[in-house]
Structure formats: C-alpha cells, structure tokens
Amino acid sequence: MPHKFGHNWSGLLRPERAQAQPPDAILALVAPQPGETVLDLGSGPGYVSLPLAERVGATGRVIAADIAEEPLALLRTAAAAMPQVRTVLVEESRLPLPDASVDAALLVNVLHELADPVGSLGELRRVLRAGGRLGIVDWDPASPGRGPRIEERVPPERAGQWLRAAGFVPEPAAALGAAFYAVRATVG
Ligand SMILES: C[S@@+](CC[C@H](N)C(=O)[O-])C[C@H]1O[C@@H](n2cnc3c(N)ncnc32)[C@H](O)[C@@H]1O
C-alpha cells in the first residue's frame, strides 16, 4: 500500500504553495467552464476545489472526493458560502457517482498515493462523459528535494501507461514548476 498523506491538512492550503503549484496552472489543465461539473479526486481540504468552485460558478458543481473525512470536514467549513461544492467520502478505487456524470476531473498530488492506480483511473474514466478531460499533477521523480521519497513517486511514463490501460488518451507530460509534472488526458 503506498504512503497516504494523513497529517497537517491545513498545511496543504499554505499560501506559499501557490509559487510551486499555481492554482491557475492546475485549473488550466482542464479549462473548467461556468456551469460544468468537475471532480477533484483526493481533494484534501480544497487547495484545488476552492478555486475550481469560483471557476464553475453558482451554476456549476465541484465534487470534492477523498478517502479521508477530516480534510473534507475542513473543506465544508471553508466552502460554507459555496453551495456548488459537494464533498463525497469515497473508497480506495470506487466512486459513488453515476456513469458519464462529470465534465472534467483533476487529480493533484494523489496519483502516487493510489493503491490501485488503474482501478482508480478506470473509475474516473467511467464517471467522465464522452469527451471529458482529466488533468493530473504529481511529484517528478527527476526533481529530488522536499516531498515524497523518490521511490514512492510515479514517473510520468508510468502515469501514461496507467492512463492508457484505463482507457484514456494521454498527452505527453509537461513540467509544472520545478518539482512537478502535469499530464492532460481525454476519454478514449
Ligand atoms: C497529498 S494529499 C493532496 C490533496 C489535494 N489534492 C491537494 O493538492 O492539496 C493526497 C490526498 O489524496 C487522498 N487520497 C489518497 N488515496 C485516495 C484514493 N484512492 N481516492 C481518493 N482520495 C485519495 C488523501 O486522503 C489526501 O487527501
């Protein structure tokens, strides 16, 4: 079982993080539009879900899903004035969502924590509509430094293999800042 983040939830919302992982650069991977339904899988306390909620607006929906309840409770408090944010407690690789029910999905700093990566990506593919977009950001094993141990990180080539195995069509990975890579994929 890969290491799971399970401490210092509020640290994930520290303002300095925006230098290494600018929220605009993350959201640009799926270009969320007003009125869309976007899934933030492994949302934690909402580093991505909160700016996403502003993008989709009052007519849209953010589904913030996580296997841990504690960060979802923090997110509910932070998003109290944003009724478009819905939190969902999920199982490791099962999403309690209907087929083809979301327009786009984001997976930020979560891929390396998945116990069943192809299973989780397959669930994402199932809940995305035809033409749906997926954006992944994770720690680059080629950029040692703070963050997960190198052996716990997922090389971008492996992320591409997992995506293809789950039925996605991935684009080549690109750097996101100095320590992360990003991959866009569409439903194949
Ligand atoms: C390092 S945190 C990142 C949180 C958030 N995406 C962010 O960027 O701030 C990883 C999150 O993924 C969640 N997680 C791990 N495995 C998961 C899974 N199989 N399904 C959903 N969430 C998962 C953890 O509980 C944790 O909240």
Image (cartoon, grey):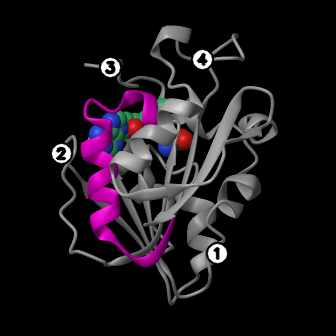
Disc 2 vs disc 3: Cβ atoms closer than 8 Å? no
**Quarter, ligand 1:** top left
**Residue type pointed to by label 4:** Gly
Q: Residue at x 55, y 25 (%)?
A: 155
Residue tagged 2: 91
Q: Position of residue 187 (x, y in %)?
A: 43, 67
Q: Residue at x 61, y 66 (%)?
A: 30
Residue tagged 4: 147
- Residue interval drawn in magenta: 111-133
The quadrant where residue 180 appears = top right
**Structural crowding at the residue carrying mark 3, measured as other residues with C-alpha within 10 Å and reported as few (<14), some (14–19) or many (≥20):** few
Asked if the beta carbon under badge 3 is closer than 8 A to the nearest atom of ligand 1, the reply is yes
Disc 3 vs disc 4: Cβ atoms closer than 8 Å? no
**Residue type pointed to by label 1:** Arg
Question: If the image is split into quadrants, where does the C terminus sit?
Answer: bottom left
Residue tagged 3: 2
Secondary structure state at the residue bearing disc 4: loop
Q: Earlier in the sequence, mark 2 or mark 3?
A: 3
Q: CA distance from mark 3 to mark 4?
A: 14 Å
Q: CA distance from mark 2 to mark 3?
A: 15 Å
**Residue type pointed to by label 3:** Pro
Q: Earlier in the sequence, mark 2 or mark 1?
A: 1
Whether residue 49 can be seen here: yes
Asked if the beta carbon under badge 2 is closer than 8 A to the nearest atom of ligand 1, the reply is yes
Residue 55: assigned label = 1
Q: CA distance from mark 3 to mark 1?
A: 32 Å
Judge depth for marks 2 and 3 and give the one in front.
3
